[in-house]
Amino acid sequence: MQEKVVVTGMNIISSLGFDLQTNWKNLVEGKSGVRYITLFDASANTTRIAAEVPAEFEEYSRQFVKKRAASQMTRVTRMCYTCAKVAVEHSGINFDTLNRERCSVILGVVNTGNSSTEKDTTFQNTIFKGMTNSMSAWISLEYQLQGPNFVVNTACASSAYAIGLGYDLIHSGRADAVIVGGADSIINREEIEGFNSLYALSVNNDPPEKASRPFSKDRDGFVIGEGAGVLILESESSAKARNAEIYAEVAGYALTSEAYSIMAPMKDGQGMAITIERAIQNAGISKDEVDYINAHGTSTELNDRYETMAIKKVFGERAGKIPVSSSKSMIGHTIGAAGAIEGIITILSIRNSILTPTINLDHPDPDLDLDYVPNHFRNKEIRVALSNSFGFGGHNATLVFRKYPS
């Protein structure tokens, strides 16, 4: 029997806040979380800006992470663990009432943030801090979950992959609940210099909040963000049995490999278009049902151009009538966490009938002519929405979310 997969809990930690409500309010208001870097002295760097999680997070996290465990975690692992704890609370799920062998943790993790900016790393904790699987392991340990717990690394699509894999476990009847999501931070000198050498990052340092400009004529690269996003996926039958509040249905997804380039997307968005097409087919929906697309929207020349072309390939004449917006304009590119954070934003858009804007769209690119919800939120009833994630290495993912009837 194939189970419907629903979302019963969520949380976001980003440069705009540590909880769902604060993040949502700031996103709807079109606020930017991009600031000058404080995690290290970036004064000599070409790029001196990022969307950092505020320093107050450390104090906030102490209510969720025990002191000994915290000393064995990096800052970004603490973000992930804290985010998961709040998401579980938000869902109201009680694992004592479930079969823990049918409960899992799957996360998208590119790295643990054990970089030159990480503090208090010693010989005693360096292994734990460097283990990418530690993020899922800590969460599994906290709730004594005995189903599979693991992480997947597919660059910028990592946590979207995690959501798809969690969906599969539940949809196939092999799990009742899966904690999915991801966390990441690459705000350190070595990785910023590495991306600068690839001409991938924005160098519009002043003012910082204007640097991330998806779909704009004057876009010049992405802005690094950091944070965590966690969702509680459950079978519909499990959620109904405990009278859980259901925020949306995960209707389907697609994962593809472009097999084209280690960095550049397939020409003219062909690989992206294939991914979107397959996600729609997998979800069993028609293209006419899609009311909104949360774009990958990185603010790079090729991504924004090719993603626009891909949407046109898939939806034809209707493409211009589908609102498309980029959350990265406000919170930067959170790399491994992006798929989960942006998936949650997509669900909140469905839930609240509000489209978050693409800010800094002051100089539209005449070649990019879709409805990018420029600069201000918009009220709109949404039945079905897509969330795109496309990563270096040709890792593509499109998630399909559907409004769940009250």
Image (cartoon, grey):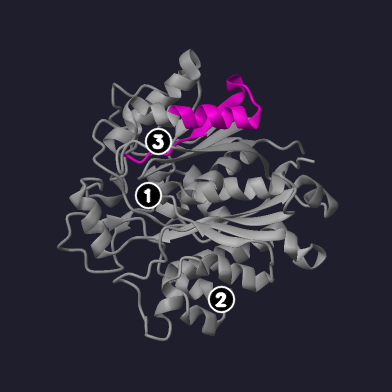
Magenta region, residue range: 273-299
Q: Position of residue 345 (x, y in %)?
A: 54, 45
Q: With 382 as the anchor, is 336 left or right in this view?
A: left
Please indicate, yes or no, whether residue 400 appears anywhere in the rendered image.
Answer: no
- Of the residues under marks 3 and 2, which one precedes in the sequence? 2
Q: Kindly give the residue lying farthest to the right in the view shown.
A: 241
In which quadrant of the rendered view does residue 149 lie?
bottom right
Residue underneath mark 2? 65
Name the one closer to the observer, 106 or 49: 106
Q: Is residue 358 magenta?
A: no
Looking at marks 2 and 1 on the same chain, the residue that comes earlier in the sequence is marked by: 2
Three-letter amino acid code at the position of disc 3 = Glu
| Residue at position x 55%, y 41% in the image | 346
| Disc on res. 258 | 3
Q: Look at 70% across and 60% down and name the residue there.
A: 103
Disc 2, SS: loop
| Residue 278 circle label | none
As shown in the figure, which amino acid type bears the numbered disc 2? Answer: Val
- Residue 61's place in the image compared with 125, above or below, is above
Q: Amino acid at mark 1?
A: Gly
Left-right relation of 304 to 57: left
Q: CA distance from mark 3 to mark 2?
A: 40 Å
